[in-house]
Amino acid sequence: MKLRISTLAVPALCVLFTAAGAAVTAGPAAATAISGGCEGGHVQFMSDTPIGLEPTQVTARLDGDLHTCVGTPTEEGGWSTDFVGEASCLGVNGKLDATFNWANGEVSRLVGPFALNGYGAPATNTLQIVEGPGSGGTVVITTGPIEKAGGSVTTCIDGPIRNVGMPVTGAQFA
């Protein structure tokens, strides 16, 4: 009888330890890939430093949102982050490290160089998704020209500016 119990116990323990080992080596679940895009959105750049014709170091707030999204965790989401870089009326260049908040509460982290071109020129930025939905992938965000402020375009000729808004004309996740 003791032999039968031992004979049955050994395979049962092997199955138990194998399952436990598989659970330990599997680790956390991989992030869900995103393969979709967004039709629009908005970026708002708010600088602590006046921006003029000459390039200058700036500390700013960069807020953005994406909407009309398909193939993404939700149809919309947005970010708000501190931004340090160089700016002039001809454009803004710096590094983005932003928490992107999806409308369902999920969070992705986007990092990479980010540029906003001056008057009349669109910009395309490719950011790495390093955490959350889409982790390991990229998002390419295209912005349009600076929006009109108060019915007329504020130019550096009128004096330094601090805040500019731009439309997002598209975003593609891969």
Image (tube, rainbow, N blue to C red):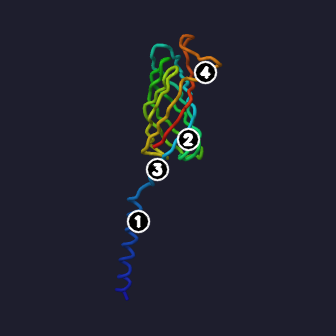
Question: Which element type, helix, strand or loop, lies under badge 1?
Answer: helix
Number of numbered markers: 4
Q: Residues within 10 Å of mark 3 (few under 14, many from 20)?
A: some
- Up-down: is 71 above or below 158? below
How far apart marks 2 and 1 lie (CA) works out to: 35 Å
How far apart marks 2 and 3 lie (CA) works out to: 15 Å
Question: Which element type, helix, strand or loop, lies under badge 4?
Answer: loop
- Residue position for label 2: 101
Q: Name the residue at 45% across, 20% down.
A: 57
How far apart marks 4 and 2 lie (CA) works out to: 27 Å
Q: Residues within 10 Å of mark 2 (few under 14, many from 20)?
A: some
- Residue position for label 1: 20
- Up-down: is 45 above or below 69? above
The answer to the question of whether label 2 and label 3 lie on touching residues, with beta carbons closer than 8 A, is no
Camera-near label (4 vs 1) is: 4
How far apart marks 4 and 1 lie (CA) works out to: 61 Å
The answer to the question of whether label 2 and label 1 lie on touching residues, with beta carbons closer than 8 A, is no
Q: Which mark is residue 31?
A: 3
Point out residue 60 in the picture as x, y percentages from the top left corner.
Answer: 52, 25
Among the two numbered marks 4 and 1 on one chain, the one whose residue lies closer to the N terminus: 1
Q: Which mark is residue 148?
A: 4
